[in-house]
Image: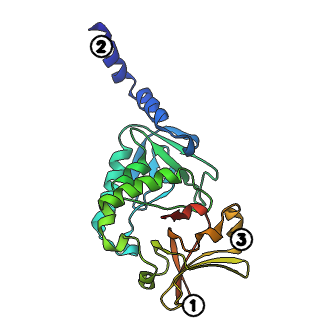
């Protein structure tokens, strides 16, 4: 009984150490090293930025919360995502890990977040975020995609809403420029022109869709056999551009491509 009392008293007196040890055990190698330890989140802003007690702001790398104003989805999903993120971030001190480059141009730390859970994974598994791979980062992308797939299979959260469902190449004609989209389809051609790589979905220019790798981004795909994408069923994601009436998504990171067959 005395030993049990000591254990309970220790947990009450040193919750910070207990939560920190829990988070450290949770952190996978892909997440990088701890950049901020024992952080206290005091609020979550509408854009998903976590504001810490010392004034620093942290962005959860690799995940994108619903943005109903731009994406046409219901507002309640955005509110729910922010509410859940706030609750998750308040469950004890948070350890944030980061890999270079560690900050964005506004000096916000780009990180994976851990306390009693992995914040990104928890949001993705509930369908309250989508995986978003930026050009210069791809840490833990397989783990993030797996969590998203679980939610999509259950039609949880945003995956029950038509405007968030993966679009076919033909349906991309109605996708507004500047919106973030997930597209699934069969690759009908892989070509090169003016230093760019074009991955076409559909042969009809007026109804088709393309993914484009700019000349300056080709280095990121060194070692990736882009020709092997021909006749493959793939899923890609990114921001929509409209080029001469044809919707496109720029690929700057191989992790934006998922092979489905």
Q: Distance between the residues labelled 3 and 1?
A: 21 Å
The residue that label 3 is drawn on is 216
Label 2 close to label 1 by CB (< 8 Å) = no
Q: Is residue 179 visible?
A: yes
Tell me which label, 3 or 2, sits earlier in the chain: 2
Residue 99 is left or right of residue 38, and the answer is right
Between tags 3 and 2, which lies in front?
Answer: 3
Q: Residue at x 67, y 74 (%)?
A: 214
Q: Where is residue 56 in the image (x, y as percent from the top left)?
A: 52, 49
**Pointer 2: residues within 10 angstroms few (<14), some, or many (20+)?**
few
Q: Where is residue 46 in the image (x, y as percent from the top left)?
A: 39, 61
Q: Which of 224 and 254 is in front in this view?
A: 224
**Up-down: is 35 above or below 228?**
above
Q: Which of 237 and 16 is in front in this view?
A: 237
Which mark lies nearer to you, 2 or 1? 1
The residue to which callout 2 is attached is 4
Q: Which colour scheme is used?
A: rainbow
* Residue 55 can be seen in this image: no
Instruction: Say which residue label 1 marks.
Output: 244
The Cα atoms of the two marked residues, 3 and 2, are separated by 62 Å
Where disc 3 sits, the SS reads helix
């Amino acid at each position: 009984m005395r030993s049990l009392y000591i254990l309970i008293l220790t947990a009450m007196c040193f919750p910070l150490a207990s939560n920190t040890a829990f988070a450290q055990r949770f952190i996978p190698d892909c997440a990088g090293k701890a950049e901020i330890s024992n952080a206290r989140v005091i609020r979550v802003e509408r854009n998903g930025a976590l504001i810490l007690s010392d004034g620093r702001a942290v962005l959860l790398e690799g995940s994108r919360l619903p943005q109903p104003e731009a994406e046409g989805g219901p507002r309640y999903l955005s509110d729910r995502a922010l509410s859940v993120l706030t609750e998750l971030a308040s469950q004890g001190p948070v350890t944030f890990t980061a890999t270079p480059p560690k900050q964005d141009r506004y000096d916000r730390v780009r990180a994976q977040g851990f306390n009693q859970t992995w914040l990104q994974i928890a949001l993705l598994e509930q369908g309250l975020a989508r995986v978003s791979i930026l050009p210069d980062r791809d840490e833990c992308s397989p783990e993030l995609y797996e969590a998203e797939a679980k939610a999509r299979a259950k039609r949880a959260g945003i995956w029950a809403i038509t405007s968030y469902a993966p679009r076919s190449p033909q349906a991309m004609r109605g996708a507004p420029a500047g919106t973030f989209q997930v597209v699934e389809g069969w690759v009908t051609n892989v070509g090169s022109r003016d230093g760019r790589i074009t991955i076409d979905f559909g042969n009809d220019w007026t109804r088709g869709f393309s993914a484009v790798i700019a000349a300056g981004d080709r280095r990121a795909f060194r070692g990736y056999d882009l020709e092997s994408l021909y006749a493959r069923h793939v899923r890609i994601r990114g921001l929509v551009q409209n080029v001469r009436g044809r919707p496109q998504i720029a690929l700057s990171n191989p992790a934006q491509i998922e092979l489905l067959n």
